[in-house]
Image (cartoon, rainbow, N blue to C red):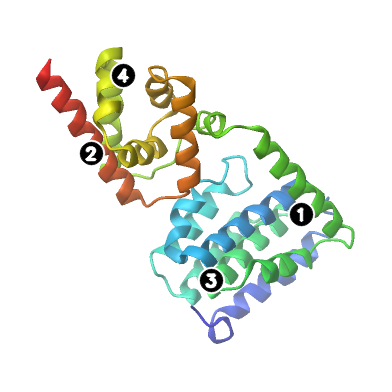
Amino acid sequence: MNDLKKNINLPLLYEIRKDVFAKSGDAEYGERFFSMMHHMDLLARTAGKEGLLALADAAKEIPLEVEFYQDIQSAVSYVCDGLEGEDVMEILTARYWIKNLQGEDALLYFMMILSIIRIQDGAPPDLLESLLMAYLPDDAAEKYTEYKKQYQSARQEQTPLEILLSHDPDIGEGGILVVKRLLEEKIEFADVQNLKGVITEAENTDLVISLKGLSVHARKKLFSVMSDDKADEYAGHCEYMGPVRQIDVLASMSELIGVFEKQERLL
């Protein structure tokens, strides 16, 4: 855990806060802010339960439409790479000034910086929520509570299978993309019999973890040869498992490729 009080670059954050107050007086506080707060809360809860390294996978679950999505991914990577708090502070505050943000955008970006810094420092989710809420109007707390209820309700209306088939994963770059591409080619060109054979022979854990890295198209191809109950079962296991490490996705995909190649030798 970092000690925020000893962060020599803490004044950089105060300078941005001063700038934000000057720019955001006429900002309209709405869903953009609540979405940022909610997803920062999810990251804080992940860090509290599983440690800072788990943030890399948790951040991939953030929807692309969340404001400053790419900046959030970069900020999380700095923390997971083990950068000191003062270095993370310097990078993020420098990015703020370079972007020359105005109004709502300035406040949103400041809230993102404050969240990442506090999460790295080990702040509990309730404290983080209070800190962020302090920058919003008095009636924001009630509206945010309603937003969270609506968000959870919308999530609950989707089955695990629908959620799994609603978006492609962001699994990063490098060797895992090569393995992913090879596995998806195996799936694409396999016939029904071959796919059923692979599903039967593969370890359930490897198949579930591989689903986290596969595209929606590849997932649909696999589920197309299963019964509805079996597809729901795999999707449920996938959701229950939660975020997994990229290295585990890579290993499971490699194992699944091996099963495909074994099936091909038998034909």
Alpha-carbon span between mark 3 and mark 2: 38 Å
Residue drawn at point x = 20 percent, y = 26 percent: 260
Q: Where on the picture, by quarter, is residue 254?
A: top left
Residue mark closest to the camera, 2 vs 1: 2
Alpha-carbon span between mark 4 and mark 3: 45 Å
Question: Label for residue 103?
Answer: 1
Residue mark closest to the camera, 3 vs 2: 2
Residue under label 2, please give it: 254
Q: Residues within 10 Å of mark 3 (few under 14, many from 20)?
A: many
Q: Quadrant of the C terminus?
A: top left
Residue 21 vertical placement versus 209 (above, below): below
Residue mark closest to the camera, 3 vs 1: 3
Residue drawn at point x = 63 percent, y = 32 percent: 158
Residue under label 4, please give it: 188
Task: Please tell me whether mark 1 sits on a helix, a strand or a loop.
Answer: helix
Q: Amino acid at mark 3?
A: Met
Q: Residues within 10 Å of mark 2 (few under 14, many from 20)?
A: some
Q: Earlier in the sequence, mark 4 or mark 3?
A: 3
Q: Where on the picture, by quarter, is residue 198?
A: top left
**Are the residues tagged 4 and 2 within 8 Å (C-beta)?**
no
